[in-house]
Image: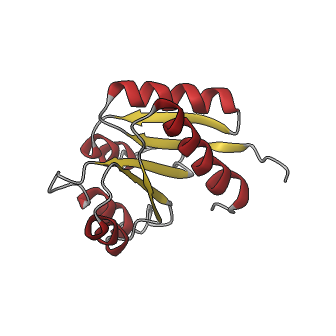
Amino acid sequence: MKTRVHDKEILLIEDNASDAQLALHYFSRSGRIKSVRHMATPEAALEHLRRPGLSGLPALIIYDLDANEPRGLTVVDQIKSDPKLRHIPIVVMTNTENKDAVLKSYQHSANSVVPKPTDMNDYLRELENIEDYWLNASQLP
């Protein structure tokens, strides 16, 4: 399969600085996406997405969801209820195996829910899987 290179960016919502750095490094080396913008909080991500004069929207949002955070899926709801943003696919990464939490993510209109491995190599493999599917196999708006 031919690897496509996108002229858009990924928005990474990740509160763990080490995981964010690892993801940023991975995507910069893969060469399939123009850039990755990192936001440490969902609130910062929403503020960025709604900023007047924003030159372009991300092709994909990867959101590290803390399943224990009660406001965690609010950002997904707000993005999916905004007519300018709702088309952006949201991949929720979570370290929980709780089936109710996974179901709740889909009920809040996440496009995909994937496990967030604790092992660095497994985490990189999961990022590669996300990239392969969403930036190679899928057609993004």
Q: Nearer the viewer, residue 75 or 96?
A: 96
Residue 25 relative to residue 49: left or right = right
Residue 116 relative to residue 3: left or right = left
Q: Nearer the viewer, residue 27 or 101?
A: 101
Above/below status of 36 relative to 3: above
Instruction: Report whether residue 9 is seen.
Output: no
Above/below status of 126 relative to 124: below
**Residue at horizontal 30 percent and vertical 45 percent from the top:** 47
Identify the residue at the far bottom of this view: 107
Instruction: Report whether residue 17 is seen.
Output: yes
Colouring style: secondary structure
Identify the residue at the far left of this view: 70
**Residue at horizontal 68 percent and vertical 33 percent from the top:** 30
Above/below status of 60 relative to 32: below
**Residue at horizontal 30 percent and vertical 54 percent from the top:** 96
The image quadrant that residue 141 belongs to is bottom right
Residue 35 relative to residue 21: left or right = right
* Residue 40, x across and y down, in percent: 31, 34
Identify the residue at the far right of this view: 2
* Residue 77, x across and y down, in percent: 30, 66
Number of marks drawn? 0
**Residue at horizontal 61 percent and vertical 49 percent from the top:** 129
The image quadrant that residue 79 belongs to is bottom left
* Residue 62, x across and y down, in percent: 45, 48
Q: Nearer the viewer, residue 74 or 107?
A: 107
* Residue 69, x across and y down, in percent: 17, 51
The image quadrant that residue 140 belongs to is bottom right
